[in-house]
Every structure is written in structure tokens, then in C-alpha cells.
Image: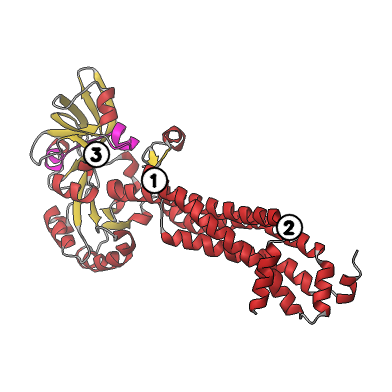
Amino acid sequence: MNYLWRMAARNLGRNTARTLLSVLAVCLGVAVVIVTKGFVDGMINTLVRNSIDIVSGHVRIIDREYRVKERLLSLNYPVDGFDGEGMGGMIRDLQKVEGVVSVSPRIRFGTLVGRKEKYEGVLGVGVDPVAEDRLSRLTRFVEGQWLKAGRREGVIGYGLMKKLGLKVGDKITMVANTSYGSMRGYSFTLVGAIKSGLQPLDEGAVYIPIDIARKMLEMPGQATEIVVGLGRGGDARTPAVLKKMEPLFGAKDPGRKYVLIPWYEHNEMISFIEKAKTAYYQIYLIILLLASFVVINTMVMVVNERRKEIGMMAAMGFSPGELRRLFTQEGLLVGLLGSAAGVILGGSVTKYFSVAGIDISSMMESVGKEFLLFPKIYLEFTLADLAFAFVAGVLITMLAAYFPARKAARMEPAQALRTN
């Protein structure tokens, strides 16, 4: 069998330009797959990660009726513990569930924020300062100070602060409807600004301590949601931890007042993105198939040019299987060389942009503010992606070479020798 490999390698050197063109096509196909996959995975992982950290946690607990009216930010369907026993007992029970790292109660409400005659309508969020930072790590974005429980302090987005002409240390006023429908205004000291690069945070949110929010909104011992975090690697462990939480709610919430929502069911977009990951693999394979057309055309040309040679080899005793393997091995060598070069090229580009990032700020307006994307996307660089692209490149190239190779193996020796 070694003689077939030697012949295949020698044949590739007979027309260097044509061989290099085939290798280049495979190289570019593999490189494009690696870079594209790195960009797509980087964008998807950033979007999912930010959604989990800042919005949904790994598991979100809300009143069943609240889910229907959530867009209205209704305060009439709160989470108030099991059988009205208060939030404290529910939080302690959740903290005992194996795998749970953080439990953060929140009150989300619509509010006007500003001072004097200048106000903006934004999302207000009442949080437990310690639990919320453990969950969403918002302090990494805060310029100034983070909140402290029991104080009339506020942290707002940097863009919103500039729009209102505010600075850290200023007094601001928040006006909101209470759970009873009456209007109430509270004054706060602005202690920090969120500068994250995420438009929903930087331009449309204000955070205050949850104990102050409860007084302001007349929601004693209540929240609109409880968000559970599972720590590093919690994305994959969510279904298992969710199963451990279900007996607790089955026993203490027999009326099914509350609903437990895992991060991958939080909204349709996240659910769609997770399902789309499989479709992307099909796109990557199509890219490689397009690159392999050059190999197919080259091998067909080679077979047609070497008809007499094929006839002579058949007359000398080469079996159809050996002829098929010879041309398939030529394609395999092209695939190996092209895929290796593509891995080096695509891997180098992906590795660079995994550190430097790609500026997508010009896309942000068209993408929409609801997408939790940073102005820079950092490509995902993994050895598994390099291996996938290399193996796929080799297999598809070899498959592309197989059909011309089969044609060569089926030639009749006498007819091939008569070819002019």
C-alpha cells in the first residue's frame, strides 16, 4: 500500500500550480469556518452569558400570573414566600438546594427618574446589594460606589446620567406607581454609574436597595421575582438543579402559584439561539463543500488528462480498487495539506481577535437595544473548533475526490489506451 502513497505524492507534484490552487481552496474554506465559528460562538456566548448574569439568572421564580403581565411591570403578582410566610423562608430553602450558589430577590418596576424639570422613563430595579452582586457582578461595571442596604442610594446607567446632566453625588428623584396604584416620589443620592457598554444598562436602568424599594412601592416583604444563580458551569447544570428544586415547590407550593423558569426558556430569542447552534454546523459544512468544488474540478481534469496512463496501469495489473485508492489518496493529501494550512491561518486569526476583539458598535443600532451585546465581540478560540474544522475539511475533500476516483477505476483499459 505504501507504493500508492508514494505515487499519489509524486502525482501531486506533476502540476504544482493546480495542486496549490486546490490546497489553497481547502485552506481558505477551513480558515473561514474557524473564524466564522469563532465569531458566531463568541457573539452567542456573550449574549447568553449577559442574559443569565443580568436578567434571568440560571433559574427565575415568579408568580404564574405575573408571567402573563410581565411586560407591564405589574406589582400586583408578587413573590411573597410559601403560603404567605414571607421571602426569608423561601430564600433560605432555596439556598439549601444542592448546586445553588446565589439567591437574589428583585423588584422590577417602571419609573421616572431625574431632577427639576428633566426626567426620563426607565426600568427601576430594587435589589439586595450583596446577593445581586454575587449573582450579576454588576460592580465590575460601576464607576463610583455600589449600593448599601437601608440607604436611599441609586446607581444609574452612565448614558442616562449624561442625558440627565447628572454626576455622582447628585440628588435624584424617582417617581413610580405603588402596588396600590398611587403615585409616590422618593429622593436618592446618586452614588455610582454603570458603564458596561450594554445599552439596556447604560441608558435605561436605575438600581436601588430592595428594602427602600419595598417602602417606596408599598410591597413589604415582597419581590416581583427571585433569581437563582448556580455559579461557574451552571448553564449545563441547570436542568439537574431544577429537578432538585421541584420537590421543594411540590411540597410547599401545592397550588402551583409559582413557576420556575430556566435560563434557556426565559425568552424566545435565547431558546431560538440555542437551537440555532445545530443549524450553524450545517452552514460550516456547506462552506467546506463549496471549497471542495475546486478539488472536484481538479480531480475530474486530472482523470481526463491521464486516461492513457490509467489504461496502462490497468493493463499492468492495477486493480480497480487500487486505481480508486490512488486518486482518493491524492485528494486526501490535498485535504490534509489544505486543512492543516487552514487551521494555522484560521486559528491564528481567531486567536488574535479572541484577545483584541472586533468592534461591532456600528451594528448596535440596527441590532436593537434588547440585545445584551458589548460593543466588542471577542471570538471564541478552542482546540475543539480547530479539530472540527480540520477533520471536516479532510473528510469533505476526500469525499470530493472519491467520485472522480471511482470514474478512473471504472475505465476499460483498452478504451483508455485508445484515447488521443
User: Which residue is nearer to you in this view: 152 or 289?
Assistant: 289
Please identify, in this view, whether the residue under mark 2 or under mark 1 is nearer the observer.
Answer: 2
Q: Please give the name of the residue rendered at 24% of the width and 65% of the height, measured from the top-left corner.
A: 245
Q: Describe the colour scheme in one phrase.
A: secondary structure
Q: Nearer the viewer, mark 3 or mark 1?
A: 1
Q: Position of residue 416 (x, y in %)?
A: 87, 71
Mark sitting earlier along the chain (3/2): 3
What's drawn in magenta, residue-wise?
Answer: 196-215
Report the disc number at residue 297.
2
Q: Is residue 38 magenta?
A: no
Residue in front for this viewpoint, 1 or 173: 1
Visible residue check, residue 364: yes
Above/below status of 353 relative to 99: above
* Residue indicated by mark 1: 378
Residue furthest to the left: 150
Dominant SS type (magenta): helix
Labels 3 & 1 near each other (Cβ < 8 A): no
> Which amino acid does the dot numbered 3 rest on?
Phe
**Seen in the image, is 420 located left or right of residue 340?**
right
Whether label 2 touches label 1, CB < 8 Å: no
According to the image, label 3 marks what residue? 141
Q: CA distance from mark 3 to mark 2?
A: 55 Å
Asked where in the image residue 195 lies, by quadrant, the reply is top left
Q: Amino acid at mark 2?
A: Asn
